[in-house]
Image (tube, rainbow, N blue to C red):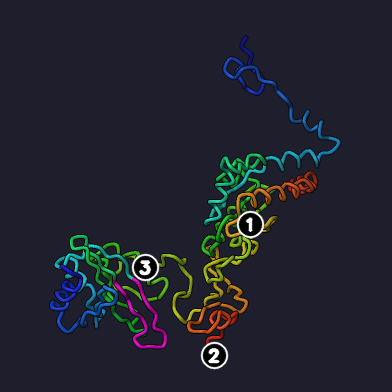
Amino acid sequence: MEKQTEIGYNSKVEGDVIVTRLDAALNWFRSNLDAGANWGRKNSLWPMPMGLACCAIELMAAGASRFDISRFGAEVMRFSPRQSDVMIVSGTVTYKMALAVKRIYEQMPEPKWVIAMGACASTGGMYRSYAVLQGVDRILPVNVYVAGCPPRPEALLDALIKLQNLVAKEPAMATLKKVA
Amino acid sequence: MTALETAQQLRAKFDGLISEPSEFRGEITLRVSDAERMPDICRVAKTELGFDYLVDITSLDNYGDDPRFTIVYHLYGYGHLCHLRLKTDVSEEKGELPTVTGVWRTADWHEREIYDMMGVRFRGHPDLRRILMWEGYPYFPLRKDFPLAGKPSDVPEVAFTNPAPLEGGPFVTIAGGKDTVAREPRVRIPETD
């Protein structure tokens, strides 16, 4: 039997759709809104892969099947900053690229986090040079630093877990009010 | 045809302008005394001697000497498979020489890189802009008197730079020391070497 629901699905095409309402879900979270929102956020951190040098190869390895970043809910690499939660700065940030990185960070919607992956992104690394920004924390607020040149994918996954623990403790609802 | 023969032929066509070929580890180098004649020499090398491929143009900063800059052209021919190197000097006061983009179009980006890094201008170049650094960056960072750490600069909305902390560096090795402590000093002060 064909049914047209209020959200516009045609059941003949889509199959029967179970409509859950957001406010019903929020009721479920009512007793502990922060924990609920943070649980959702920390298990679906969508990365903005800011791949600037060889660390990006390890980032790709972290996304591939052997290490599989999707075990931690962060497999949705978005090359559009508007859809991202966490910027993974993986590689050498040159001064020529610095303001572009900053601009992309600013285009990401709140709440947002930054992982500085590798020695270069954290401190400039071996490039004590006229051309290289000495750590991306000079222009962005970094949440987690990953040591290594380049770090192994496990190290990035460890940073992701650390970031998840960080996100779990955030006062999510208070931040929402502040933004609104 | 060997590289030495092509070098001799090129030298014969520009008598007095090109030095005796010097050979080092099988590579032939010619010095050109007048940088203004480089396009003529290069055109003959390409059209008559078969050097159809410009491998690279590089530059040296002989800081403290006059003439200060040396421009080095690396030539290759796919017909005879020979390499040839041409060197010419440019003084700091003059700081320019004619372009060879009319001979090999690939010279375009090589010359832009030399202009960007060393500040030597190429007269007649179709598009002499910086290629690695951004427009408005005020220094030429590969010159010997430019510090490794860099200098502060700011082009609003484009890029900024700050000097890098060297923490006692740069850590440059010194040849001939009797042990690694002497060969690789933690701190090296150029004045005392």
Q: Residue A23's x, y, as percent?
A: 77, 30
Q: Label 2 near label 1: C-beta < 8 Å?
A: no
Q: Residue B123's x, y, as percent?
A: 30, 73
Residue at x 48% of width, y 71% of height: B137
**Residue B112 circle label:** 3
For disc 2, the marked residue is B192
Q: Nearer the viewer, residue A134 or B135?
A: A134
Q: Label 2 near label 3: C-beta < 8 Å?
A: no
Q: Is residue B1 above or below residue B31?
A: above
> Which quarter of the image is occupied by the C terminus of chain A?
top right
Q: Is residue B64 magenta?
A: yes
B13 lies left or right of A31: left
Residue at x 21% of width, y 65% of height: B51
Q: Is residue A178 above or below residue A142?
A: above
**Which type of secondary structure does the marked residue at label 3 adopt?**
helix
Q: Amino acid at mark 3?
A: Arg
Among the 4 quarters of the image, the one containing residue B19: bottom left
Question: Is label 1 or label 2 in front?
Answer: 2
For mark 2, name the chain: B
The Cα atoms of the two marked residues, 3 and 2, are separated by: 36 Å
Q: Residue B101's x, y, as percent?
A: 27, 66
Quick one: label 3 or label 2, which is nearer the N terminus? Answer: 3
Q: Which residues are magenta?
A: B58-73
Q: Residue A174's x, y, as percent?
A: 80, 47
Q: Residue furthest front?
A: B178
Q: Is residue B156 above or below residue B31?
A: above
Among the 4 quarters of the image, the one containing residue B160: bottom right
Question: Is label 3 or label 2 in front?
Answer: 2
Q: Is residue B140 magenta?
A: no
